[in-house]
Image (cartoon, rainbow, N blue to C red):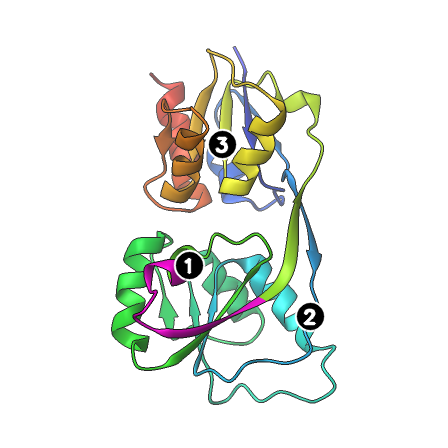
Amino acid sequence: MEKNVFISRDLTEDSVFLQILQPYPIKVIGQSLIDLSIVYFSSLPSASWYFFYSKHGVKFFFEGCQQLPESLDFSNIKFATIGESTAKALTNKGFEAAFIGTGEPISTADAFLKVAGNDTVLFIEAKKSRQSVQKSLINKIKSYNLVVYKNEQKEINDLMINTDFLVFTSPLNAEAYLKRHYIQPHQKIVAIGESTAATLRRLGWFELVVAEQPNEKALANCVIDLLQK
């Protein structure tokens, strides 16, 4: 019998999640529950490092930079990302990350402190960012925040409600779903990382699986493991 999987992410045709699950009797519904829009900024604080939390931050930061009156020189800036997918987005913009985190906030903060502890860091983030890395570095590092986009919850398609698996890719996506819908007893929950898992637990859902890595391959493997149980 075919199973249905909802993942809170808009998937492209070359999605690793889709590719891994393709051989299995699974129908995938991929849709973000968050609307994203740019927040323009008029200047950039002086910093040695620019730290990106997500590929969306990369996208909207460089779009915002194009609206600034003066041309920017990033030759003396070191770039950091929370994980591999964000680093890839940065590479696609023509820049390489000097630091790439694990995707998990606490271990990323610990490792980043070792390389940037004496420098000034600009954290590039969403309006509703949990600031998970810089909160772990309070009183340990000098930093500024720059909001470059808004993330707002949007309406949920009814097709998502009766799926067998719910795969949440961020805390805000989990909140958006649970704000409107109750998770059914038969549904299995997968979280992309500990921040998302912590949000689900805070909202009362403790029976869940956390992906070993915050990427689509690990999420797909979680679904396969649950499917085979």
Which sits earlier in the primary sequence, circle 1 or circle 3?
1
Q: Position of residue 52 (x, y in %)?
A: 49, 65
Q: How far apart in space, not on screen, are marks 1 and 2 (Cα)?
A: 21 Å
Q: Closest to the observer: 67 or 143? A: 143
Answer above or below: position of 34 versus 22: below
* Quadrant placement of the C terminus: top left
Which sits earlier in the primary sequence, circle 2 or circle 3?
2
**Residue with the mark numbered 1:** 84
Residue appearing at x 58%, y 41% in the figure: 9
Residue count near mark 3 (Cα–Cα under 10 Å), binned few <14, some 14–19, many ≥20: many
Numbered label attached to residue 167: 3
Residue appearing at x 49%, y 32% in the figure: 167
Q: Where is residue 221 in the image (x, y as percent from the top left)?
A: 38, 34
Residue appearing at x 51%, y 13% in the figure: 184
Asked whether 136 falls inside the magenta stretch, the response is yes
Answer above or below: position of 195 versus 30: below
Q: Which amino acid does label 2 sit on?
A: Glu
Left or right: where does residue 99 sit relative to residue 74?
left
